[in-house]
Image (spheres, grey):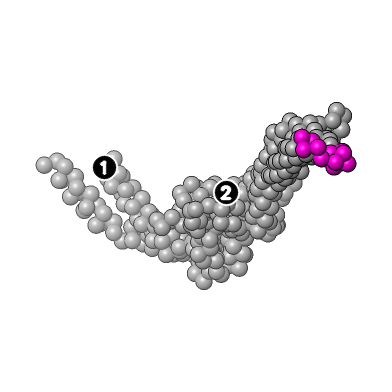
Amino acid sequence: MEEPEQIRDAIRILWDKKKPIFTWALLVGICAALLSLTLKNYYKATTVFYAASPDLAKPELIFGNSLSDPEFYGSGEDLDRLLTLCHSNEIKDHLISTFDLYRHYKMDSTRPFAHHKIRKKLDKRMEVVKTKYDAIELSIEDQDKALAASMSNEARESVNRAAVKLITDRLSAVSVTYRASIQEKQALLHALNDSLYRLRKIYPIYNIEAQTESMSAIAAQVSSDLAGEQARYEVLKKSNAPRDTLMYLAARIKGLETQWRNITRSNAGVASFSLENFNEGVSRIQSLDLNIERLNAQLNEDRIRYQHAVNTAGAAAPALITVSQAEIPIYKSRPTRSLLVIAAALFSALSLSLYYILKSFWK
C-alpha cells in the first residue's frame, strides 16, 4: 500500500503546484518562441537520379559487335559506385571552389585545418540517401534558396563527370593497348613483306594457283610435243625421208628438249620459272602469304577496335540518369519553431514538477 500512497502524494503535490508549473512553462515557451525567431531559416534542395549502365560505354555493345542487348539502367554495384563518389572529397572540393564557400560560410581559409573544417560543414549540410526504389537523392541545405538548388544540381553533374572519367580512363588505357598492338603488328608485317620480297627474287612465284595451272599445262604440252616429234622423226628416218626434213625434225626435237629442261630444272643462281624451282619455293611462299594475310586481318581488327574505343571515350556516355533536377525550394527545412517551443515548455514543466516532488520527499 506504500507505493500507491506515494503516487497519490506526487499527484497531490503537482496539483497544488499546477499554477507555478503552468506559469513557468508558459514563460519558458514564450522565451523559446522569441529566441527561435532569431534562428535563420534553412532550405533544402533535392535532386534525384539513377545509375546508368556501363553497357552504354562498351564499344562492343554500342557498335553491334555483341549478341546481347545493352542495359540502360545500372545494377546495385553501379549504384554503390555513384554513392561512393557522392561522398568523396573530390565532389566537396569542387563545390567549395565553384561556389566560394569560404566566403559564403564566413570562414578564414588561411587558418589551420580550415579545409578540413569546411569539408565537415558542407558534409553536415549535404545529404545523400538511397531510396527504396534504388534511386539516389542528393540534397543540400542552405540559407540561400537559389544557392541550395544550384549546389545540388552542380553536385549531381560533378558526380556524373567523375563517374564518366573513371570509364573514359579505362577506355583510354584500352586504346593505348590497342595502339601498341597495332604498332607491333605493323613492324612484324613490314618484316614479313621484306622476307617475301627477298624470297620472290629467288622463287618468282606470285600467284600459286594460277602458276600451278599454267606450269602443268605448259609441261604437258611440251612433253606431248616432244614425244610426237620424236616418234615422227623415227618413222621418217626408217622410210628414208629427205635429209632436210630429218634435219628440221632433229632441230625441233632439240628445241623441245631444251624447253623441257628449262621447264623441269632450274639454272643455278638464276631466278627461273621452272617446276623444280616452283616446287622448292611454293611451300615457303605460301606460308609467308598465309602469315601476311592472317596478320593483315588481325591488324584491321585491332584498328577497328582502337577506333571504337577512341570514339566511345570521346562520346562520354552519361553515368547517371536524372529523374528530377533540384528546384528552388519554397518551404524551409529547418528550424521547426513550433516543435522547439513545445519541447522547451514541456521540458521546463517536467523539470519543475520533478523539483517539487523531490523537494517534498526530501522533507
Q: Residue furthest left?
A: 1
Quickly name the residue at label 2. 85
Quickly name the residue at label 1. 361
Name the residue: 76% across, 43% down: 206
Q: Which residues are magenta?
A: 237-248
Foreground disc of the pair 2, 1: 2
Residue 240: in magenta span: yes
Position of 347 with respect to 15 (left or right) is right
Q: Can you tell which quarter of the image residue 157 is in? A: bottom right
Position of 215 with respect to 167 (left or right) is right
Residue 39's disc is none
x then y, percent, for residue 356: 31, 49
Q: Can you tell which quarter of the image residue 146 is in? A: bottom right
Question: At numbered mark 2, what does the secondary structure look like: helix, strand or loop?
Answer: helix
Q: Residue furthest top?
A: 268
Q: Residue furthest front?
A: 240
Image height check: is 268 above or below 103? above
Structural distance between the alpha carbons of marks 2 and 1: 59 Å
Q: Residues within 10 Å of mark 2 (few under 14, many from 20)?
A: some
